[in-house]
């Protein structure tokens, strides 16, 4: 599907999530990066990107992505969730 429709974000998100669950973090990271090129500043994508960076032990980059996601979230519950992730 992504070969025919590379901008199909829903499919790419599902692929990135599946790759992360399979501990294929580098491949998942590449998918998140591509999604963020399509939708820069999207806080949901940034949070998931940051989670994958953290899985890879890239704490500084993860923190930066979490902070960027935090700026994009409007709902208090979303901001609180990201703040908890930042405090880990």
Image (cartoon, rainbow, N blue to C red):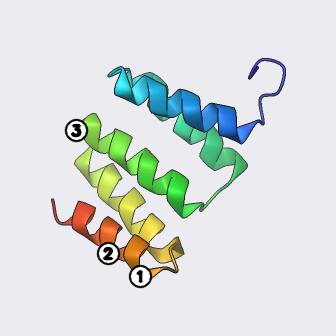
Instruction: Tell me residue 75's x, y (percent).
Output: 48, 79
Give the mark nearer the N terminus: 3 vs 2.
Answer: 3
Q: Name the residue located 32 percent from the left edge and 22 percent from the top edge.
A: 23
Tag 3 secondary structure: loop
Report the Cα–Cα distance between label 3 and label 2: 22 Å
Q: Disc 3 designates what residue? A: 57
The numbered disc on residue 27 is: none
Q: Quadrant of residue 12?
A: top right
Picture quarter containing residue 67? bottom left
Q: Nearer the viewer, residue 83 or 57?
A: 83
Relative to residue 55, is residue 63 depicted above or below?
below
Q: Position of residue 66 (x, y in %)?
A: 37, 61
From the image, which quarter does the C terminus lie in? Answer: bottom left
Q: 10 Å neighbourhood of mark 1: few (<14), some, or many (≥20)? A: few
- Kindly identify which residue carries mark 2: 80
Labels 1 & 2 near each other (Cβ < 8 A): yes
* Label 2 secondary element: helix
Between discs 3 and 1, the one toward the N terminus: 3
- Quadrant showing the N terminus: top right
Q: Tell which tag, 3 or 2, sits nearer the viewer.
A: 2
């Amino acid at each position: 599907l992504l070969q025919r429709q590379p901008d199909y974000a829903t499919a790419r998100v599902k692929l990135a999530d599946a790759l992360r669950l399979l501990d294929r973090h580098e491949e998942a990271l590449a998918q998140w990066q591509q999604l963020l090129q399509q939708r820069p500043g999207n806080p949901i994508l940034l949070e998931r990107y940051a989670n994958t960076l953290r899985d890879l032990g890239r704490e500084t980059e993860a923190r930066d992505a979490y902070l960027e996601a935090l700026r994009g979230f409007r709902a208090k519950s979303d901001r609180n969730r990201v703040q908890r992730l930042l405090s880990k």
